[in-house]
């Protein structure tokens, strides 16, 4: 005679401690869950709505400057340290964790044009309108001692920007020429020029550390290699570029902020056509900076807004603005990929969240798992019309909305005019020109 018994293993359902969650057996057979799709859609819709409800990106305002903020310098080792330079020559070092100013000193007569930390973070380099490069110790002086630079280098040319090499002790300045310097010498080890009046921004490539790029006053972008005696290549756009930022993960790619309200991402191997044109700003774009992941970048504009872009998309994913914020002059993305800094004309440095609805502070494992599940749902159902509309909608200032409407009308009229000319012209006389190629005039080698 056979006796059939039910056998259960207690490990499958008994908790080890009272603090553990009860184990719930689940059968994931899709035949048993016919409403899984609709249920997930509702969860995705609710997650998208909650995302907009909790979207409060503004964190704090760092006040203390007595003139407009001109430039930023990120510390390569300390996430909580930020250096800012102002129009009146003052440099401030901020403790971001406590939201206070650690140090402040007058570094230059006139504007502070650029700030850069040495690769080990022990020295701070500043350039200004007084034609000097000053080297400062990052450790504050003792009580009672005055702030004095470690070294002062007098340049023969006016200086507009500075960038430090990520791997060695060299740094580069731009002005009338592009000069390569060594930390141990007071004279440039190399001077590079390509017949341009003024170079107003310079940036070292963080991956290919011998390559650097400048934006010039003749609307060109010039590429240099510090191992070569001559500049490498030059591409001329229709309008002037204000700032340049290299992608920290893709060595060949960089993005420039342009006067024509757009940003352009280029591949150095094919400069005739930009990889992507980034729209949405309604006034000149003044600064751009990449996230450390290389997937996103932030831009600041004269239209008093800060926009966040996906590196491979044409339109911004988010826009930050406040009533008091005026023309945004400089922006930066923190090296832990969580915060964004903006400096503007009204003497304030603002700190924002990189992800507007992100929860700050301690997140428990179950909460983290729920956030990841919601992100996966939003990504899965992102193309559904209702979810797409809610996720994309943003409130923008009235002056931005009016300017966007005006720019859209102008663009539509230009397209209609071009179509009419093409219709009444000989076939092939008025060629179709893509949006990417409209903004690049020529490339020089």
Image (cartoon, rainbow, N blue to C red):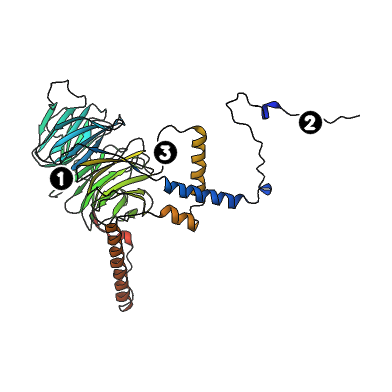
Residue drawn 33% across the image and 35% down it: 335
Q: Where is residue 293 in the image (x, y as percent from the top left)?
A: 38, 40
Spot the residue most to the right: 1
Residue 339 in the image: above or below residue 412: above
Numbered disc 1: secondary structure:
loop
Which residue is the site of mark 3? 359
Q: In this view, does 338 lie to the left or right of 127?
A: right
Camera-side residue of 107 and 364: 364
Q: Where is residue 207 in the image (x, y as percent from the top left)?
A: 32, 38
Numbered disc 2: secondary structure:
loop
Q: Do the residues labelled 3 and 1 touch (CB within 8 Å)?
A: no
Report the mark closest to the observer, 2 or 3.
3
Which of disc 1 and disc 3 is earlier in sequence? Answer: 1
Quadrant of residue 103 within the rendered picture: top left
Q: Do the residues labelled 2 and 1 touch (CB within 8 Å)?
A: no
Which of disc 3 and disc 2 is earlier in sequence? Answer: 2
Which residue is the site of mark 1? 193
């Amino acid at each position: 005679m056979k006796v059939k018994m039910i056998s259960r293993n207690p490990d499958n359902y008994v908790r080890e401690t009272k603090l553990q969650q009860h184990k719930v057996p689940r059968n994931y057979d899709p035949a048993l869950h016919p409403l899984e799709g609709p249920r997930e859609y509702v969860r995705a819709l609710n997650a998208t709505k909650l995302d907009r409800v909790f979207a409060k990106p503004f964190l704090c305002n760092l006040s203390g400057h007595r003139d407009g903020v001109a430039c930023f310098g990120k510390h390569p080792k300390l996430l909580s340290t930020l250096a800012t330079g102002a129009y009146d020559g003052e440099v401030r070092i901020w403790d971001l964790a406590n939201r206070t100013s650690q140090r402040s000193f007058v570094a230059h007569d006139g504007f502070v044009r650029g700030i850069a930390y040495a690769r080990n973070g022990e020295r701070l380099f500043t350039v200004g309108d007084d034609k000097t490069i000053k080297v400062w110790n990052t450790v504050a002086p003792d009580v009672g001692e005055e702030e004095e630079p470690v070294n002062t280098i007098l340049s023969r040319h006016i200086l507009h920007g500075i960038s430090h090499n990520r791997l060695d002790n060299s740094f580069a300045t731009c002005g009338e020429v592009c000069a390569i310097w060594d930390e141990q010498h007071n004279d440039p080890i190399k001077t590079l020029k390509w017949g341009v009046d003024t170079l107003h921004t310079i940036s070292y490539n963080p991956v290919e550390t011998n390559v650097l790029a400048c934006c010039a006053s003749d609307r060109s972008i010039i590429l240099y290699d510090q191992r070569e005696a001559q500049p490498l290549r030059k591409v001329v756009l229709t309008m002037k570029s204000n700032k340049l930022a290299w992608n920290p993960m893709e060595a060949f790619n960089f993005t420039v902020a342009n006067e024509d309200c757009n940003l352009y991402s280029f591949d150095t191997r094919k400069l005739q056509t930009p990889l992507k044109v980034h729209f949405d700003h309604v006034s000149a774009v003044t600064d751009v900076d990449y996230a450390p992941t290389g997937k996103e970048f932030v831009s600041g504009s004269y239209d008093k807004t800060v926009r966040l872009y996906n590196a491979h998309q044409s339109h911004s994913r988010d826009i930050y603005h406040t009533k008091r914020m005026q023309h945004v002059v400089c922006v930066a993305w923190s090296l832990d990929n969580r915060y964004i800094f903006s400096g503007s004309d009204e003497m304030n440095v603002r700190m924002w969240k990189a992800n507007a609805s992100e929860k700050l502070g301690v997140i428990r494992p179950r909460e983290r798992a729920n956030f990841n599940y919601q992100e996966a749902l939003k990504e899965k159902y992102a193309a559904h019309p209702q979810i797409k509309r809610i996720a994309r909608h943003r409130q923008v200032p009235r002056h931005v909305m009016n300017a966007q409407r005006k720019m859209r009308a102008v663009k539509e009229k230009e397209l209609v005019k071009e179509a009419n000319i093409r219709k009444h012209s000989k076939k092939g006389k008025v060629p179709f020109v893509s949006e990417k190629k409209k903004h690049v005039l020529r490339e020089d080698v």
